[in-house]
Image: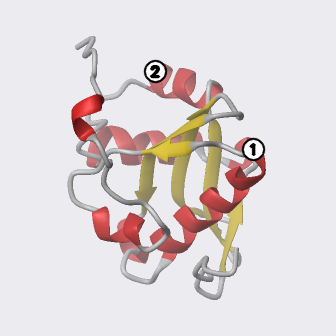
Amino acid sequence: MSDTPALPAGYEFSADTARVDVDRVHGWLSADAYWAIGRTREKHERAMASSLNFGVYDEASGEQVAYARVVTDQALFAWLADVYVDPPVRGKGVGTAFVGRIRDHLKPYGLRRMLLATHDAQGVYEKVGFRPLDRPDQWMVHPFE
């Protein structure tokens, strides 16, 4: 899509799960992501196995600098989860461009909607078309924990 911000020079997007640095991503999420603090490696690997996985990588070193996963039926619905950008590359536009690339990757599926939850990054997502729920009173949750 033409409104997708470009990744900063020197970074590349990938939808190849085999490229994901599982150790690095698990470390980020389980130690630094408020929604996943303490998540076990086994639970993270199970989540990855049932999701589409995405990354942004430093082109020079090959090091992963961002991660996200999407839970989807690939027909109607998607849930964007575990979006994480390594602190040293935050503020460079990687996160916004990354989410835009994920949105573009999912576009051919013809989904009706993609949801996410965030405590503090609404501005990042608004830049690529996310908005608050039109009718939040229609949504419900069943917490298992």
Q: Quadrant of residue 90?
A: bottom left
Residue drawn at x 58%, y 31% is 48
Instruction: Indicate the quadrant containing the C terminus: top left, top right, bottom left or bottom right.
Output: top left
Count of all numbered marks drawn on residues in the image: 2
Other residues around mark 2 within 10 Å, as few (<14) / some (14–19) / many (≥20) = few
Residue drawn at x 44%, y 52% is 83
Type of amino acid under label 1: Tyr
Q: Nearer the viewer, residue 133 or 103?
A: 133
Type of amino acid under label 2: Lys
Residue drawn at x 47%, y 66% is 129
Q: Nearer the viewer, residue 11 or 6?
A: 6
Residue that mark 2 sits on: 43
Residue that mark 1 sits on: 109
Spot the residue most to the bottom: 9
> Can you give x and y, in whole percent of width and height, for residue 10 in the image?
65, 83
Q: Secondary structure at mark 2?
A: helix
Other residues around mark 1 within 10 Å, as few (<14) / some (14–19) / many (≥20) = some
Q: Secondary structure at mark 1?
A: helix
Q: Earlier in the sequence, mark 1 or mark 2?
A: 2
Q: Nearer the viewer, residue 117 or 114?
A: 114
Q: Nearer the viewer, residue 36 or 125?
A: 125
